[in-house]
Amino acid sequence: MSTELSPEFLSEDRSEEVIVTNSIFITLATITVILRFTARKVKKISWSADDYFILAAMSCVWVLYILTILCIKHGLGKHIEVVAKADVATFLELLYFEQIFYILSPPMIKFSLLFLYKRIFLSKRFLVVVHTLMAIVGVWTLIMLFMGIFNCYPISAFWTSEGKCFDFRNFAIGYAVVNITTDMIIWVLPVPMVWKLQLPMGQKVGLTLIFVLGLFDCAAATTRLITSMLSLDSKDPTFDFQPGFIWSIIEPSVGIMCACLPTVRVIIVAVVPKSWRKAFAFTSRTTKPQETENTAWPRSATYNEIHGKKKVMETDSQGSEVALELNDLEHPVDLRGITVQKGYKVEIQDISEEEIGTGV
C-alpha cells in the first residue's frame, strides 16, 4: 500500500508544529504561575488550597508536554506508513497515559478557582453554589478517571487491541460536555459578586474582563472536542491525532493563565506605568476614606493578599474580602490586619432668622 503513496505524502511531518505551539503555551502558563507565587511573596501571604491546585494543574500539563515529546519520538506528526510497528505500539501506549493526565488537568483548574471563590467571598448563598460545584466536579473527576484507566479490559488492550474496550467516542463526548458546561458556570460565577463591591467602576470592569477571559478556556475545550471527534476513528493516528495533542496542551494552559490573572494583577500594576493604569482599569484609587472606628474583622488575616498599606472603605458584606483580595498593590504590605470602618454623615442646613428667633 505504501508504494502507491506519493513521496510528498510519506515525507509529511507535522511534529515541529506540535513542539513550537505546545512550548509557547506551556511557557506562558508557567510564567503566570511563577508570577502568581511572586505576588504571594511580595504580599507575604502563605499558600492556600487554590495555589496547591494550580500547582497540581501545572504539573499535569508538564507531564502532558513530556508525553507529547515522547510521542513525537515514536511517530507523532508522521503518517503511520512510515512509522515502525514497534513505534506505533509505543505511541498508543503513551497515548493511554496522555488521556489520563488530560482528564486530571481541567478539574485541578476548576478546584483552584472554586477554592479561591470560597476564600474571598462571604455570601452564604454564593458559598452553597461553590460547594455544590465542588461536589459535582469531584464526583465527575473520579468517574472519568476510573473510566479513563479501565476503559479497556485488559488495560493493555488500549494499545494492543487484544481485548474489549467501551465506546471511546461517547466517553470523550460525555467528558467534554461536562467539562465545558462547568467551565462556563465557574468562570462567570463571580461576576455578579464583583459588581456588588464598593470599587471604582473602572476596576469593576477590569475584574469582570479578567473572569470573562476564562471563557477562552471553554473555547479551547470546544476546539479540542471537535478536532478529537474528527480524528477519533482515523486509520492514521500518528498523523491525524496531531491537532488533539496540541489542544490538549493549549486548553489547560489557557485555563491556568486565566485562573492566575486575578492574583497576578498585583504584579501587572507594579510594572504598568502610572499614566496607563487608569486607561486599563489598573488603578484602585477611591474617594477619600472617612474616619474609622477600629473593629477587628473576623477574617482579617487572609484579607491582605492583594491590598496595599492604605485605608479601606467599608465594603458590601457579601463580598468584603474580594475587594481587598483583588485590589491593587501600590504600597508596602501591612500584616496587622484590616479593620472595618464606620462612617459618620454630617448634614449642614441653612437656618432662617425666624427659626433662630423661635428656637426651632
Image (cartoon, rainbow, N blue to C red):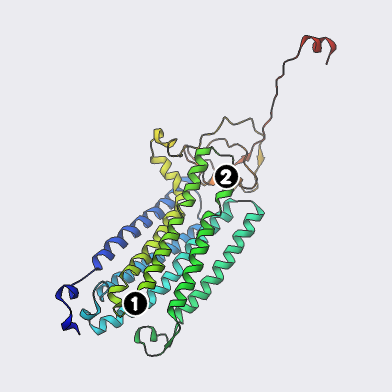
Q: Amino acid at mark 1?
A: Leu
Say which residue appears at 50% left-offset and 47% top-offset. Answer: 208
The 10 Å Cα crowd at callout 2, few under 14, some 14 to 19, many 20 or more, is some
The quarter of the picture where residue 129 lies is: bottom right
Using the image, determine if residue 334 lies above or below residue 130.
above
Q: Residue at x 25, y 75 (%)?
A: 75
Callout 2: SS: loop
Disc 2 marks which amino acid?
Trp
Residue beneath label 1, please?
94
Q: 157 and 111: which one is in front?
A: 157
Q: Which mark is residue 195?
A: 2
| Neighbourhood count class around disc 1 (C-alpha, 10 Å): few under 14, some 14–19, many 20 upward | some
Disc 2, disc 1: CB below 8 Å?
A: no
Quadrant for the N terminus in the image: bottom left
Which is nearer the eye, 81 or 94? 81
- The residue drawn where x is 14% and y is 75% is 7
Q: What kind of element bears circle 1?
A: helix
Q: Mark 2 or mark 1: which comes first in sequence?
A: 1
Q: Position of residue 211 (x, y in %)?
A: 49, 51
C-alpha distance separating marks 2 and 1: 46 Å
Which quadrant would residue 220 be assigned to in this image?
A: bottom left
Q: Residue 122 in the image: state x and y as whole percent.
A: 63, 51
